[in-house]
Amino acid sequence: MQARSVEFDRGAAWFGEGWRIFIANPGLWIVLVIVLVVISVALSQVPILGQIALDLVFPALCGGLFHAAHELAQGRKARFEQFFIGLSDDKLRKPLLVLGAMLVGVHVLLFVLGFIFVGGSMGMASMSQVATPEMMTGMGVGMLAMLLLFALFGMVVGLAFFYAVPLVMFDRVAPLDAVKSSVAACFANVLPLVLFGIIYVVLAIVAMIPLGLGMLVFVPVAFGAAYASYREVYHGAATPPALEVGQGGGQV
């Protein structure tokens, strides 16, 4: 799909739309966030396989939140069971799981690269009982390179998946094409997304202050804002017409 470039200040306006979507049904949003956290924590407790499973289903769970945002943005009633539409809808399950498999692949690659950098540095240190200045410098450079690489990968993954899930959900774009389109759309809207990111970080920090309880509001608003961004960048308006999601989900 062809993405549009939008004005710089739209990066802030999307949060206004996200707030409007949240207050349309705050009780449901809070329940959905709690369920998402419970699922994430439960899977993360299982060594290795749990994290793989979480990565695999995470795009589908995010799809459920985007579905709720879509329903509420149109003034319709969102239902709790729709949170699992990404897994229950036959037409959505496979492409969203493919996105999840891509996420698994990225994290495996990061793990391997981290092992190479950190393991290599630690191996050099273990072979010598005395850490020389040159060795310490090498370890420091290796750690810095790893951190920079992780930051770069994190940015690339963020660009790749920012619009990918709603593109698969609502526009039936193939997973790989959705990832490519998401990256292109992000580069075409660098300035508004930088503003979006700054506001996102500030709000996330504020949300963490009251024992993290503010995240119950921040997460839905952020998803609503991301949805509004997708709608405007790809469809020209933050308020959507009805779109067909699939037989399992009906009209959204």
Image (spheres, grey):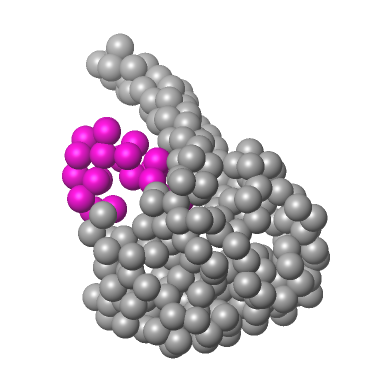
The percent position of residue 172, horizontal first and vertical second, equals 63, 50
Q: Is residue 101 left or right of residue 2?
A: left
Q: Is residue 11 above or below residue 162?
A: below
The percent position of residue 61, horizontal first and vertical second, equals 40, 55
Q: How many marks?
A: 0
Quadrant where the C terminus is found in the figure:
bottom right
Picture residue at 73% right of the left edge, 56% below the top: 185
Residue 162 appears in view: no
Find the residue positioned furthest to the top. 127
- Residue 45 covered by magenta stretch: yes
Q: Main secondary structure of the magenta part?
A: helix
Quadrant of the rendered image containing residue 135: top left
In the foreground, 212 or 89: 89
Picture residue at 33% right of the left edge, 45% below the top: 54
Q: Is residue 119 left or right of residue 72?
A: left
Picture residue at 27% right of the left edge, 33% below the top: 48
Quadrant of the rendered image containing residue 231: bottom right
Instruction: Tell me which segment is drawn in magenta.
Output: 40-61
In the foreground, 61 or 71: 71
Picture residue at 34% right of the left edge, 36% below the top: 52
The percent position of residue 37, horizontal first and vertical second, equals 28, 61
- Residue 24 covered by magenta stretch: no
The percent position of residue 236, horizontal first and vertical second, equals 76, 72
Q: Is residue 56 above or below residue 249?
A: above
Quadrant of the rendered image containing residue 62: bottom left
Residue 130 appears in view: yes
Q: Is residue 61 above or below residue 33?
A: above
Q: Is residue 16 above or below residue 205?
A: below
Q: Is residue 127 left or right of residue 4?
A: left
In the foreground, 11 or 4: 4
